[in-house]
């Protein structure tokens, strides 16, 4: 009988022999980690190994990930208008805090490059643009992008290995929270299990065991807050709220500006979303089989924005705004940015208008993607949230 990941493979574009060998090596490594852990690891560990094992994981290996040749397209990859529009909010936050940016998980470096060029245009260049990136391969790619497109700005850019001890300024992260490893939890009446990964007949397989510790506490709390029906399977990210709390501890005056897809808690754990939000991306095909070719596909989950706000506020941050990507971009002047390209210049205008449509359309990224700002020492209303602020839903 075919495993579920073999069934998934049948409907997806076939990988090359080299890619298969790369994935097989990572699978052997993950299997060895499972054996070393007495035959079972949590899904968070599986996701971490699949995405971030040095030089073997999806993000830390050499595969083309972003853009048309890769597996998925992020907003900064769609068109420079995303970063240019974001520039207005970034400029305001720099003026209210300090002229420093840390971008976390900078992907191919497109956002960093377009944002720096836009800030330069308005005379508000940060003194330092630091990038905190887990993947050595992506660091090299980010540097190459900036060297190619904005060589004169390279001296302002540096790469960090860890969070600074103290930071004033702006922390920016686009589609990073969704790439942080999460636990899988199964609620069955009073019994709450953690769904983890084992090896069965040489293949990865699911195995449940009773949830414990902090994860169990979180799962129990969710069962009292939300309508969790028996058999409900979903994700709990402990990593993303912990990461927000880490930033809160080092932030003096400034803000975290986070853009990602997800929902407030009651929508995230809605009875109809009873199989969770876990999603894999391979060559622009989205599917739900995380065991399919580890290292060759992205594994993501949606963000519980209520958990992000709770973690930030408990750690001393204030919620500065929460809205949809569409409202945020319009508030920041997307229409004016679009108007920079003459309609008559159809070769440039039509692809740009098409990309902008993807950024704001409710059927694409406009509603599912949210922008959230959490900060310290910022009292002025933020430009990106002047209308359409949905903080009240959190
Ligand atoms: C989906 S990609 C998004 C890339 C880019 N921001 C964009 O929008 O195109 C996720 C990125 O987050 C990075 N990442 C995930 N967790 C991270 C963490 N804890 N610290 C730093 N980078 C992280 C990954 O290495 C990858 O670069």
Image (cartoon, rainbow, N blue to C red):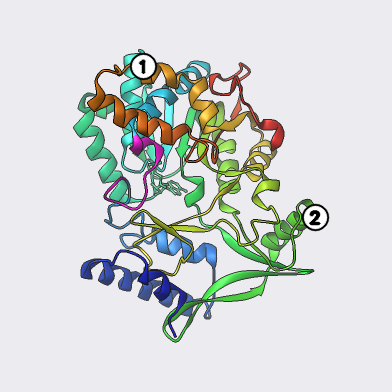
Q: Nearer the viewer, residue 329 or 183?
A: 329
Gap in angstroms between the C-alphas marked 2 and 1: 49 Å
Tag 1 secondary structure = helix
Q: Which mark sits nearer the N-terminus, 2 or 1?
A: 2
Magenta stretch? 67-78
Residue 339 image label: 1
On screen, residue 228 versus residue 202, left or right, reads right
Residue, x 58% and y 61% (percent of image)? Answer: 183
Tag 2 secondary structure = helix
Q: Is the residue marked by circle 1 packed among few (<14), some (14-19), or many (20+) residues within 10 Å?
A: few
On screen, residue 130 versus residue 364, left or right, reads left
The picture quadrant where one finds residue 316 is top right
Residue 244 coordinates in the image, percent (x, y): 57, 42
Q: In this view, does 91 lie above or below 221?
A: above
Nearest to the eye among marks 2 and 1: give it. 1
On screen, residue 306 versus residue 88, left or right, reads right
The picture quadrant where one finds residue 384 is top right
Residue that carries the numbered disc 2 in the rendered image: 224
Residue 110 coordinates in the image, percent (x, y): 32, 35
Dominant SS in magenta: loop
């Amino acid at each position: 009988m075919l495993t579920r990941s073999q069934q998934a493979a049948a409907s997806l574009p076939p990988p090359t022999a080299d890619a298969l060998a790369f994935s097989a090596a990572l699978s052997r490594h993950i299997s060895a980690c499972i054996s070393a852990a007495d035959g079972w690891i949590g899904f968070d560990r599986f996701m971490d190994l699949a995405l971030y094992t040095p030089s073997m994981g999806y993000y830390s290996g050499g595969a083309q990930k972003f853009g048309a040749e890769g597996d998925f397209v992020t907003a900064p990859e769609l068109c420079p208008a995303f970063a240019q529009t974001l520039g207005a909010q970034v400029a305001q936050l720099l003026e209210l805090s300090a002229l420093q940016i840390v971008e976390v998980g900078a992907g191919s470096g497109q956002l960093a490059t377009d944002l720096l060029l836009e800030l330069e245009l308005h005379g508000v260049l940060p003194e330092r643009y630091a990038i905190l990136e887990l993947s050595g391969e992506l660091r090299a790619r980010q540097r190459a992008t900036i060297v190619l497109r904005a060589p004169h700005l390279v001296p302002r850019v540096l790469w960090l290995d860890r969070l600074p001890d103290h930071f004033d300024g702006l922390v920016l992260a686009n589609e990073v929270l969704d790439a942080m490893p999460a636990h899988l939890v199964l609620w069955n009446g009073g019994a709450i299990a953690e769904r983890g990964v084992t090896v069965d007949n040489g293949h990865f397989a699911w195995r449940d065991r009773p949830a414990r510790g902090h994860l169990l506490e979180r799962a129990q709390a969710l069962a009292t807050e939300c309508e969790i029906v028996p058999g409900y399977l979903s994700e709990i990210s402990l990593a993303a709220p912990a990461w927000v709390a880490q930033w809160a501890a080092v932030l003096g005056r400034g803000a975290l500006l986070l853009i990602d897809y997800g929902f407030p808690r009651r929508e995230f754990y809605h009875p109809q979303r009873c199989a969770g939000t876990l999603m894999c991306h391979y060559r622009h095909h989205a599917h739900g089989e995380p065991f399919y070719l580890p290292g060759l596909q992205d594994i993501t989950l949606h963000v519980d924005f209520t958990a992000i706000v709770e973690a930030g506020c408990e750690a001393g941050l204030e919620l500065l705004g929460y809205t949809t990507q569409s409202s945020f971009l319009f508030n920041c002047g997307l229409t004016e940015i679009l108007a920079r390209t003459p309609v008559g210049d159809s070769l440039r205008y039509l692809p740009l208008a098409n990309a902008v449509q993807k950024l704001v359309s409710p059927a694409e990224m406009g509603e599912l993607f949210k922008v959230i700002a959490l900060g310290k020492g910022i009292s002025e209303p933020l430009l990106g949230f002047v209308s359409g602020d949905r903080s009240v839903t959190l």
